[in-house]
């Protein structure tokens, strides 16, 4: 469920008319709903009632400072993957002390920054990394809390680029080698064994792989608790969201109409399956959801430049492009596209929705049926709150888009559109070319 819907045929985010946002701040612009994020947070925690749960929001999904501040206000900590992300959490005046630091290639400087700011735990992906963290902790004269990421070798049945829990992925230590890794870790003088972690992939749409992974890893987790007194088990993130019926899925009626055997994964299904498996462990459970928390809480607003009618093919050329939202080009992913002004009297149009970039991959949708829209009219790409702005780039010398946060009838620019001067500020002509 989310807070994007038509009010008098105009698409609103909570109580804000999105066309007004586009008028004020231009396009392309990302718009986020604070209420949707708060609902997602509350719903996830409620579905895991009975467990001692800490959400470490995977901020790589959307790391705007306002989004971080909002999650911190809700009580969330963070799953961090770089020194830059640690600095963002600090800049948002949020809590590093309950946050965890993941990633396969943490540098010594990043490890030191995390330790200096009292990180809750490092999620360690390899034995060389144990050695490195021990070394940095020793230099600083502190003990580094760690958990090892185990790879349960479970097929998450998701896109190859976002599967992480199969053997053959670069992530984690295979379950059968994990006991030896903990033994090695226990011998380092500057490490404290605090937990165990896994994360099997992203955009999972059924609970089966989560259950399989928890079942596979739980006996090992119980052993670690007995042997080393670990205090938590992080089961990672990965819960999927609705992309195909994104707008409709904002209404309870849409969920009620889904046949029981085809119902998309919900936090309630996730909780019902996992709570009974996790409860007997008697450990704190960390969650690292990213996409689920923010994906359906954001849209990308764009303006139509042209409707180009071709022989047997129409192209709707819009002012957003693959640099603003790379998911369709990178993962062949689907984003629902809707007009900001709905007009049911208008004809339907079948078109490829494309950006202006000189790449045939710069295409948001192929042969998509939409309401006919023309030059200057506004559209929204739905479900763009996760892995949207954070993956954007400046290809074709296009500046970074603006970001706006809505709460109720209030909205504010939370990241100004980049200017050309900002974009080229670090560049210069070298002396030998002058
Ligand atoms: C990316 C990532 C997550 C979040 O994944 P989502 O699919 O966005 O929930 C959680 N944990 C780890 C270790 C990750 O790499």
Image (tube, helix red, strand yellow):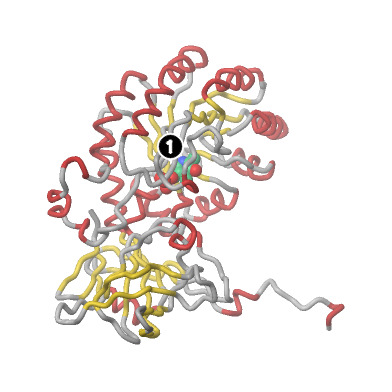
The picture places residue 210, in percent across and down from the top left corner, at 36, 33
Residue occupying image coordinates x 40% and y 68%: 364
For label 1, being within 8 Å of ligand 1 is answered yes
Camera-nearest residue between 199 and 328: 328
Camera-nearest residue between 419 and 333: 333
Residue occupying image coordinates x 53% and y 32%: 167
User: In this rendering, would 285 be left or right of 260?
Assistant: right
Q: Which residue is mark 1?
A: 236
User: In this rendering, would 173 be left or right of 341?
Assistant: right
* Residue 79 visible in the current orientation: no
* Residue 371 visible in the current orientation: yes
Residue occupying image coordinates x 66% and y 22%: 188
User: In this rendering, would 136 be left or right of 68?
Assistant: right
Q: How many marks?
A: 1
Residue closest to the far front: 311
The picture places residue 115, in percent across and down from the top left corner, at 60, 38
10 Å crowding of disc 1: few (<14), some (14-19), many (20+): many
Figure check: 211 above or below 255: above
The picture places residue 301, in percent across and down from the top left corner, at 36, 72
Q: Quadrant of ligand 1?
A: top left
Residue occupying image coordinates x 77% and y 78%: 429
The picture places residue 427, in percent across and down from the top left corner, at 70, 74
Figure check: 32 above or below 306: above
Secondary structure under badge 1?
loop
Figure check: 301 above or below 309: above
């Amino acid at each position: 469920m989310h807070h994007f819907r038509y009010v008098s045929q105009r698409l609103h985010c909570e109580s804000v008319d999105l066309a007004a946002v586009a008028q004020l701040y231009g396009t392309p612009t990302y718009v986020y709903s604070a209420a949707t994020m708060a609902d997602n947070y509350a719903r996830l925690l409620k579905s895991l009632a009975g467990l001692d749960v800490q959400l470490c929001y995977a901020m790589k999904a959307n790391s705007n400072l306002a989004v971080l501040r909002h999650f911190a206000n809700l009580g969330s900590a963070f799953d961090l993957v770089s020194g830059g992300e640690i600095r963002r959490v600090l800049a948002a005046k949020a809590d590093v002390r309950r946050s965890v630091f993941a990633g396969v290639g943490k540098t010594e400087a990043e490890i030191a920054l995390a330790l200096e700011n009292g990180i809750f735990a490092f999620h360690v992906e390899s034995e060389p990394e144990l050695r490195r963290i021990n070394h940095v902790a020793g230099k600083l004269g502190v003990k580094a809390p760690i958990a090892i990421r185990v790879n349960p070798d479970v097929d998450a049945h998701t896109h190859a680029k976002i599967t992480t829990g199969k053997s053959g992925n670069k992530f984690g230590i295979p379950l059968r080698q994990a006991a030896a890794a903990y033994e090695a870790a226990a011998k380092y003088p500057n490490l404290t064994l605090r937990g165990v972690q896994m994360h099997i992939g992203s955009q999972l749409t059924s609970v089966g792989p989560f259950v399989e992974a928890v079942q596979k890893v739980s006996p090992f987790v119980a052993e670690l608790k007995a042997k080393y007194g670990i205090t938590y088990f992080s089961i990672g993130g990965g819960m999927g969201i609705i992309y195909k019926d994104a707008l409709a899925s904002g209404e309870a009626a849409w969920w009620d109409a889904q046949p029981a055997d085809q119902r998309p994964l919900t936090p309630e299904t996730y909780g019902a399956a996992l709570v009974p498996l996790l409860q007997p462990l008697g450990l704190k459970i960390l969650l690292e959801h990213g996409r689920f928390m923010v994906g359906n809480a954001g849209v990308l607003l764009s303006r139509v430049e042209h409707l180009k009618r071709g022989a047997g093919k129409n192209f709707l050329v819009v002012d957003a492009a693959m640099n603003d939202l790379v998911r369709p080009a990178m993962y062949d992913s689907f984003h629902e596209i809707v007009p900001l002004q709905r007009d049911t009297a208008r004809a339907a149009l079948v078109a490829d929705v494309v950006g202006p970039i000189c790449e045939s991959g710069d295409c948001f949708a192929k042969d998509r049926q939409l309401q006919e829209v023309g030059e200057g009219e506004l559209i929204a790409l739905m479900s763009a709150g996760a892995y949207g702005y954070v993956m954007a780039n400046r290809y074709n010398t296009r500046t970074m888009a603006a970001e706006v946060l809505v709460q109720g009838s209030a909205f504010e620019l939370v990241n100004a559109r980049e200017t050309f001067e900002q974009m080229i500020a670090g560049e210069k002509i070298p002396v030998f070319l002058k």
